[in-house]
Amino acid sequence: RAKARRGELRISVPMGYVWHRDVGLGLDPDIRLQQVIRLVFERFRQLGSARQTHLSLAAEGVFFPRPSDGKRLTCFDWTQIRYRNVISLLKNPFYAGAYVYGKSEKRIELVEGRARKSYGHGKPPEAWEVMIRDHHAAYIDWADYERNQALLAANAYGRAGGQKSSRGGRALLAGMLTCGRCGRGLAIVYTGAPPGRPTYRCDRPNLMLGLPRCLGFGGSRVDAAIASEILRVVEPMAIEAALEAERMHREGEAERRRVAELDLQQAEYDASLAERRYAACDPENRLIAAQLEKHWEAALRRVEACRARLAAVNAPDPAMPMPDFAGLAADLSAAWSAPGVTTRSRQHLLRALISDIIADIDDATREVVLTIHWRGGQHSQLRVRKPKTGRVPAVGVGGRARSPRRSAARGRW
C-alpha cells in the first residue's frame, strides 16, 4: 500500500496503457488503439449519451480490442465495439491521467451461521484509498472526466433530478420542463388518433399521492415558441456557428478516415503474417496446413472488408451531399425545419443553450408561462396562449408560435 500511495505499485491497467520498464505507466504504443479510444471520448462529447455513442460507432463499423483469452492484456482480437467497451472507457479515471487504487472492497456476510466473503463491491470516489491526479499521460483532462460522470449520472433512468440527454421523440422539450408548482419534472404523453401530439403534464402528485395533477398543456405551441426563441438568440452568431459546424464536420470525416486506414493496415499485416505461417508449414502436415489456410483466408476476407469500408469513407454518398453551412447560416428557420434534421439534433442544440425551463399556467389569461434559464446565467420569460380543450394548433416544431409574449431579460446568452 505504501507503493500504491506513491503511485509506484504496478497494478493492472485498462486498455490503452502499459507499464514500461524504465518510465513507468504510459500510453500503449499501438497508434490504432489510441485512435479508437480518443474517438470514443470525442463521439461522447458530441452526442452526450453512452448508448448513442455505441450505436454511432457500431454503425460505422468501428472495432475494439478484447483479450484473446478473455483475461490477460497480452494478445488481442479486434471485434465489433460493444456498449460495455464504451461505458468502461467513460467511467475509468485512468484515462484522465489519475492513478487510482482501492476502488472496490471485500464484504463479509453471515449466511446460515457462516462467514461468506464477496469481492468487487465498488466504493464511491471519496472512499478510494489512493487517487493521484496527473500521474501519467491522459486521453482526456480531469474536467472532461468529471463532466462525463455528471452527464452519465443525469442520463440514468429512474433517477430524480438532472437533465436527460437528447433522446429523440416528437416532443422538443422532453426532459427539460419543470413544474412551477411542485418542482417535479413534467411527463410527456402522446394523444390524438393515431397518437402523435405531445402533451406535457405533471403526473407525479397524482401517481404518488393520488392528488390532482398540478398542470397540463399541449406541446405543439410551446415547442414552436421555444424553437422561435432559440432561432432569435442564435441568429447574431449564425456565421460563427456555421464555420464551427463545418470544422466539426471535417474533423469527423478525418477521424473516420484515420480509423479505417489503421484498420486496413492492421488487417494487411495480419494477412501477411498468416501467409508466412502457411508458407512455413510442412505441406505433409495436413491438419496444421488446413487450419493455417483457413486463418489466411479469414485474414484476406478481413482485408477486403477493410478496403471496402475505407473506399466507402473516401467516396462521398450522392444521397447525402456536403452540407451548405453558409446557406444554413443565411436561413436558420429553414435549416431548423429541414426534413433531414432530426428531433434529436434540435434537442441537442436546445440543451447546449438552455439549462432548464420552469412551466406554469396563468389561469386568468389562459396562458402557459415559461421561465427559461439560459446557460449563461440569464433568464427570460415567454407566454404562450394555451389551446382550448379539443383544439389543435396548426403549428409544427419548426413553425412560428402565434404571438408568444416575451419579457424579462434580453440580450445575448
Image (spheres, rainbow, N blue to C red):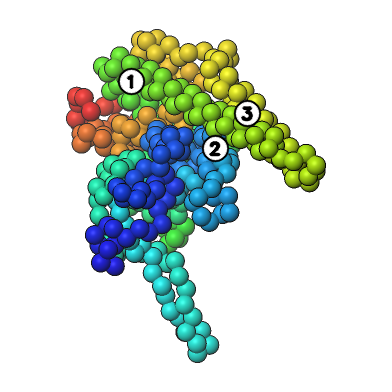
Identity of the residue drawn at 21% across and 24% down: 412
Amino acid carrying mark 3 in the image: Val
Q: Residue at x 49, y 46 (%)?
A: 85
Q: Quadrant of residue 139?
A: top left
- The residue nearer to you, when weighing 12 against 145, is 12
Select label 2 or label 3 by which is in front: 3
Q: Position of residue 288 (x, y in %)?
A: 75, 45
Q: Which mark is residue 409?
A: none
Which quarter of the rendering shows the C terminus? top left
Q: Amino acid at mark 2?
A: Phe
Callout 1 amino acid = Glu
Name the residue at 41% across, 72% down.
106
The residue identified by callout 2 is 63
The label nearer to you, 2 versus 1, is 2
Q: Residue shown at 68%/30% (left/top)? A: 301
Badge 3 or badge 1: first in the primary sequence: 1
Mark 2 → mark 3, Cα distance in angstroms: 14 Å
Q: CA distance from mark 3 to mark 1?
A: 35 Å
SS type, badge 2:
strand
**Callouts 2 and 3 close, C-beta under 8 Å:** no
Q: Which residue is mark 1?
A: 244
Instruction: Say which of 254 and 19 sits in front.
Output: 19
Q: Report the residue marked by disc 3.
A: 303
